[in-house]
Image (cartoon, coloured by chain):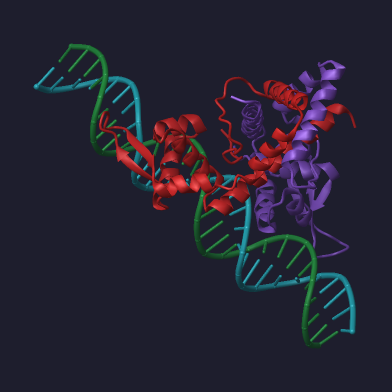
Chain colours: A red, B purple, C green, D cyan
Amino acid sequence: MDRTDISLIALRRILRATELFGKQLAQAAGLTAVQFRVLQLVAEKGTCTAKEISVRMRVSQATVTSLVDKLVHQGMVERQRSQTDRRQTNIVLTPKGQATIEDAPDALQQRYVRKFEALEDWEQAMLVASLERVAAMLDAGELDAAPVLDMGDFRKPS
Amino acid sequence: MDRTDISLIALRRILRATELFGKQLAQAAGLTAVQFRVLQLVAEKGTCTAKEISVRMRVSQATVTSLVDKLVHQGMVERQRSQTDRRQTNIVLTPKGQATIEDAPDALQQRYVRKFEALEDWEQAMLVASLERVAAMLDAGELDAAPVLDMGDFRKPS
DNA sequence: CCTGTTGCTTCGGGTAGCTAAGTAAAACAA
DNA sequence: TTGTTTTACTTAGCTACCCGAAGCAACAGG
């Protein structure tokens, strides 16, 4: 087995681990990974609009509406008509949503972060360089990408 | 922004790229990524049982049944009662399924492979070491992982 | 036989995603 | 002012994926 295959297998392990993480998180937080991702985006800035979420998550606004509906239903966020532009709806975090974000287990990410920070300096540098290299080899281009290991659900097609 | 964040962002880019790939593939092959993954598993050995698929993909048998239904409906595979144990159903590839697998674009994987193989020897070695390291940091444990960049969840259909 | 286990399917139900169509408000124009 | 276009969001309807529970065969042991 050559190096190319080995690297593909490692990549696949990474993908799997992240996928499984999404499921764990969903179970622990009472939210699905996608819903949690929306909550994270809202929490990042305290408030945001549906449009913003749809752009950042690369899903349609209709999808955002239904995701937000679920979060509202669970009391994680609230909708507030914007005062400055009444077409817009600001989605704001409730205390419960705030608490959920803070308590989120982040089991996998924590494990990763802990291990990463335990590495020698040169090892960290090597990993960063390698990961960026691989990302560049895979990407078509842009992509925002926040420092969050969540993967908004893996599925789906265009 | 520290190295930990940078590495998380790179990981996220990798996940996204793979996710998008799933969509492309789905569109090109007329199958969703998940369906395609089932087809790959069947193709790998020429035939396999529903149980096997459910274990390898880590989904329930009920899910496998419905996925296989769709592949059968599209003429990609056939069900055959096992002669040795009539509880089992062997899922076998049809010529059409075979052709689909062979023609699969694999755009992303090809791009990655090409670029990977163009690297200097020492760079390849570094990437492999790094990826394996990261995979180990994320994984809980086992996982089979075939040398296929597919990510068995990303959906979307024809 | 009777009982238990295994392999698969069926059924019902939830989440996630999309498109198309509709409403409302803002922006721009005539 | 009035009309048109654009933007932001929601509604409605559909598909895919996934699961658990329940059902049905068929094997396996006693």
Tell which of B104 and A60 is nearer to you: A60
Residue C20: x and y in percent read 40, 35
In the visual, does A87 lie left or right of A142?
left
Inspect this view and state whether residue B102 appears: no
x 49%, y 48%: residue? A100
x 43%, y 33%: residue? A45
Residue C1: x and y in percent read 81, 88
Tell which of A45 and A141 is nearer to you: A45
Q: How many marks?
A: 0
In the visual, does A91 lie left or right of A103?
left
Inspect this view and state whether residue A52 appears: yes
The C terminus of chain A - image quarter:
top right
Residue B95: x and y in percent read 79, 40
x 73%, y 31%: residue? B104
Tell which of B133 and A156 is nearer to you: B133
Tell which of A3 and A112 is nearer to you: A112
Does residue B9 lie above or below B123 as drawn? Answer: below
Q: Quadrant of residue C8?
A: bottom right
x 42%, y 44%: residue? A68
The N terminus of chain A - image quarter:
top right
Does residue A85 lie above or below A108 as drawn? Answer: above
In the visual, does C9 lie left or right of A38?
right
